[in-house]
Image: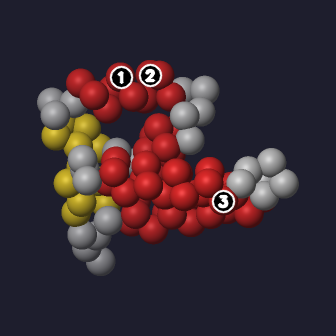
């Protein structure tokens, strides 16, 4: 089955938020994942935003691990160019 991955769904997996379990199960059962190339930029910006806003409780290691997880997960998505 195909599934379109939007940024909020993607970030729920990266951040392991309250919807993580359900999102990850959906991620694992779908063989063809696709998204806009914007997911790369949008998720990168959001990861840095969360880090910046929570710098007192999050360390640099959290940022590095989140960006590594983002890159690993992106390899499982077929990215499409946006057409204007």
**Looking at the picture, does residue 27 appear above or below residue 36?**
above
Q: Nearer the viewer, residue 69 or 47?
A: 69
Earlier-in-chain disc, 2 versus 3: 2
Which residue is at the far right? 56
Q: Which mark is residue 60?
A: 3
Residue under label 2: 22
**Looking at the picture, does residue 24 appear above or below residue 56?**
above
User: Disc 1, disc 3: CB below 8 Å?
Assistant: no
Residue under label 1: 25
x and y percentages locating residue 5 in the rendered image: 34, 45
x and y percentages locating residue 6 in the rendered image: 40, 48
For label 2, the crowd category at 10 Å Cα-Cα, with few meaning under 14, some 14 to 19 and many 20 or more, is: few
User: Disc 2, disc 1: CB below 8 Å?
Assistant: yes
Q: Secondary structure at mark 1?
A: helix
* Disc 2 from disc 3: Cα separation: 28 Å
x and y percentages locating residue 10 in the rendered image: 43, 44
Q: Nearer the viewer, mark 2 or mark 3?
A: 3
Give me the residue at 44% from left, 22% from top. Answer: 22
Residue 49 vs residue 40: left or right?
Answer: right
Give me the residue at 54% from left, 58% from top. Answer: 64
Residue 17 vs residue 84: left or right?
Answer: right
Quadrant of the rendering where the C terminus is positioned: bottom left
Q: Which mark is residue 46?
A: none
* Disc 1 from disc 3: Cα separation: 28 Å
Quadrant of the rendering where the N terminus is positioned: top left
């Amino acid at each position: 089955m195909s599934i379109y991955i939007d940024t909020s769904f993607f970030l729920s997996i990266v951040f392991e938020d309250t919807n993580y379990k359900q999102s990850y199960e959906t991620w694992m059962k779908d063989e063809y994942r696709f998204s806009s190339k914007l997911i790369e930029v949008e998720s990168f910006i959001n990861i840095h935003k969360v880090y910046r806003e929570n710098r007192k409780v999050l360390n640099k290691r959290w940022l590095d691990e989140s960006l590594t997880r983002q890159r690993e997960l992106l390899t499982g998505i077929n990215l499409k160019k946006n057409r204007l």
